[in-house]
Amino acid sequence: MREPDVPQAHSTAALTTAPPALRRGACPSLDEPMQTGDGLLARLRIPGDHLTPRRLQAIAETAARYGNGQLEITARGNLQARGLTHQTAPRFAEAIETIVPIERGLVVETPPLAGIDPLERADPRPLASAIRARSVAGLGPKVTVIVDGGGQIDLVALGADIRFSAISPDHWQLSVANTPVGSVATASAAAAAEAILTLIAAHGEAARGRDLPPEVLRQAVAAHLTGTASPSPRPATSAIGEFTLDQGFAAGIALPFGSIDSDSLIALARSALVLGITDLRLAPHHALLALAADPAMLAAWIEAAANLGFITAPTDPRGAVSACIGSEGCASGHLAARSLAAGLSEHHRDLLDGSITLHVSGCAKGCAHPRAAALTLVGAEDNCALVLNGLAGDMPLAEIASARMESALTRLTRQRLPGETTAACLTRLGASTIAGLFRQE
Ligand code: SF4
């Protein structure tokens, strides 16, 4: 599956007469939703990640009408609707296009506060637009460019085929497959991106930045490089919290386990409307930002979000946990992953101290967290498997009955020394001791 070389809208007629392409492991989109265990999953690429409360409400109502009402904001800040069917997916797509414009073509991501953030080193939007304008044919749909101005909510934690990280308004660090290549001037950055994208395309539709031989890559961009400078490091950022902007303020909340039911999202959008908030932004790490001139409006919105069950504090242990719907909504699930995750978040706050990520997955596919996590609990035929520092599909360290998971985590928590983080504790214990604790040897 690939998206058109030149971004173009699919006609309504095409959507209503042709079933969407369904390919496991493909990149889901509105035009080509992906088959999952709970039906079809459609990803909505919202230009600039900007939504009004009315649009968010309409999208949630449409997701409830045509899908199972479960909505997600992904780790990259994309909105997704779940539980569509072959019959409803085209109608969903048609309805969404009447609510909000949908972006197609090369994925070029910028931070959600780009251009209005007083702490960013450079406004990434002009460079992002220039890269989007240089259409390169033959790229796969997963190829991603990040242009990060380095503000209060950066995109450092997200992977990218090509990344421009602002050093200053005039210079960017260029990285390919998360490996620094050198620095480039703003004036030649889009040309450097085009040269790399052309190389990726030449390696075939499945190619990514990581597939480029280093010497070929360096030769392709040599004329654009100005040195080896890199941005000065900054502490990791969270989108949950309050932010001061060039004009006005922003406040961020997150969806518990990246997912929420449509009723709660509709209620959240309505509360923004009632408060007079007009600007919402999808943000990385399953977050949603509201922007307003008056911080009191944002405080009231945060309170409404907390009452609806959203994550409103960076210390909420649910923020360290990823979980899919599992057996409560997915035919492939062997575990009620989200319910188990909710219980573990409540009962194991000490374990979830922010130093580790816990992933609870209904099966080995690991939809909710397609990256390594410190601890991953995976539903299997008869048991629950534990994977240490890996993906849901990796070799388990131990297997126990899911009913014994709570007590196994309690035994693990008791191993922590005073003042020790969970990450340090896991490192100190090592794999064989952790396996023994889980098996209660
Ligand atoms: S990881 Fe979860 S959502 Fe994905 S297929 Fe397995 S059970 Fe279903």
Image: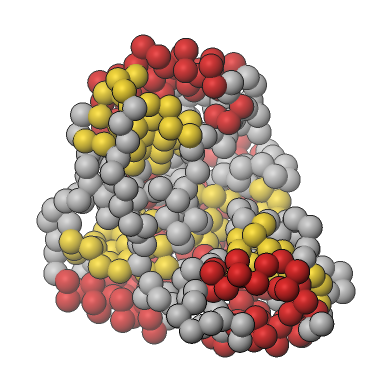
Count of numbered circles on the image? 0
Q: Residue at x 71, y 83 (%)?
A: 408
On the rendered structure, is 407 left or right of 230? right
Q: Residue at x 71, y 73 (%)?
A: 434
Give how far across and how far down residue 414 sits, in percent: 61, 86
Give 428 or 277, whichever is nearer the viewer. 428
Q: Is residue 363 above or below residue 224?
A: below
Q: Residue at x 61, y 42 (%)?
A: 27
Give how far across and how far down residue 194 sits, in percent: 43, 20
Is residue 204 visible from the viewing direction of this image? yes
Give how far across and how far down residue 159 sits, in percent: 50, 43
Q: Is residue 96 above or below residue 203?
A: below
Is residue 64 visible from the viewing direction of this image? no
Give 261 or 100, whichever is nearer the viewer. 261
Q: Residue at x 54, y 21 (%)?
A: 214
Quadrant holding the C terminus: bottom right
